Image: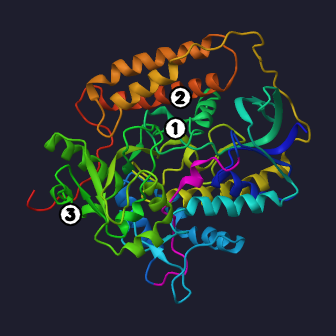
Amino acid sequence: MKNYDVVIVGAGAAGLYGAYNLSRELKVLVLAKRELTLCNSALAQGGIAGVYNSPEDSPEFHKHDTFVAGGYENDPESTEILVTEAHTDIGKLIELGADFDKQADGDYHRTLEGGHGKHRIFHHADSTGAEIERTLLETVKGLENVELRENALVCDTAKTSTGFSLLVKELNGEFDVVNAHFVIFATGGIGRVYKYTTNSAIATGDGIAMAYRMGAEIKNLSYIQFHPTAFNNRQTRECFLISEAVRGEGAYLRNCKGERFMHLYDKRLELAPRDVVSHSIIFESQRTGSDEFYLDITHKDADFVRNRFPMIYKNLLGQGIDMTKDYIPIFPCQHYLMGGIKVDTMSRTTVDGLYACGECSCTGVHGNNRLASNSLLEAHVFSRRAAADINERVKTAPKDFAEHEFDLREGAPKMPEGNRRRIRAIMQEDYFVIPNVKGLGKGLEEVEKIMNTLDTERYAIDSDYVVARSLATCAYIILKEAYEICQGSEEIPNMPKFEKPEEV
């Protein structure tokens, strides 16, 4: 089958929930770049934030915390939708079978995370994303109108007179072209543009890069979140995340001397928003001359810690660290993207018929810094809205399908090695927690040269080439945005708003 009403690129929470909410009368194809379970959604530990049967909480409180964390750069309309419609999608996940933790009285256990003024995080121990992904995958597999295809790399997308054509490379190396009236990009973030990231291997910005090449507006791609507590073993590029919820349950941050230090930088201490904590760690690193930092929850009951964080406990034990007795080595690491493909409140991009949901999109709800556990919520709220819009628009869609003829570059040479490695080194050096303002121009120039070479040279279309081209495109947009902010001034992009203690 080549022709579909809707093709969804990405099989994380946004892609699967979008597929679930599409009309059962539509023919839908969901494409996963690798295995169906390999996505950032499945890695989410903390939970999904939202007000659902919570008499002591309200959407207004949730919106306030979201605005504070986002530096008041959040889009008001989208944020209002996010917090007021949260109950709909949390309720639907519960209905579909998501097993969120409960208290002894049978009510749902809601945890606290940095930046939240209320306990409003629904979770499944410390592996909430995996539980949601399991729930949605089981649900969507049971839909007769939805085809799921894994190990299907989308190499390019083209606009046609009736919608879109997508060039797909299968695991066996064969190319396929599929056509659709509507396309939803749910391709995740850009984590692999950095040397160190908490993101999985599929987070290479493919959807953002393809949308950019089709002329879609990209917004705030330089708004990148660095999580303050990634496990720091100084060896692996994909860094294991120590959930925000660990600090929510009372963990302390300590410097190289074993001293708590957050009181020097922000009165909210360890529960300050992520960008504040990450910047505080870098400032403290400069003050002490050391990059050794730790998370300490040893003062809490050992059984509570093991039961509350079973996945983190097990993973750390495999590294020789017992979090009930030992300090956990941590350091900031690339984690999330607040910007992306610009969309409206129905997830429509500026290219007619193209939608974007989840981390690859920019709804504006996160401002310049995402509030913890709002990402899973955003993925559900806005993919549902995308599906609702498509369900209406498909009634007047063409009955036929045009097909774009792609150049498959048969016999073309393989791309030279080293491009991805160089891009990551530039990004890590020039645009980490506190950007290297003076180096941005030089880094931008080098990345632009790599991008132009990959765009113009006729290299073989394989995974290495597609990923390198995506990374180069995203790195270029990020550095260009940051450079334009800094030009003519010493302003540092995306500095957080600290609430400093009076004695500092």
x and y percent of residue 415 in the render?
61, 14
Report the span colored magenta.
36-55
Magenta-drawn stretch contains 38? yes
- For the C terminus, the image quarter is bottom left
Q: Nearer the viewer, residue 384 or 36?
A: 36
Q: Which mark is residue 190?
A: 1
Task: Check disc 3 and report the residue beneath it.
Answer: 267
x and y percent of residue 483 in the render?
35, 27
Residue that appears at 83% across and 34% down: 178
x and y percent of residue 233 in the render?
38, 43
Please, what secondary structure does the residue beneath circle 2 have? Answer: helix
Which numbered disc flags the more N-terminal residue, 1 or 3? 1
Circle 1 crowding by C-alpha within 10 Å: few under 14, some 14–19, many from 20: many
Residue that appears at 35% across and 75% down: 301
Circle 3 crowding by C-alpha within 10 Å: few under 14, some 14–19, many from 20: some
Task: Check disc 2 and report the residue beneath it.
Answer: 471
Which numbered disc flags the more N-terminal residue, 3 or 2? 3
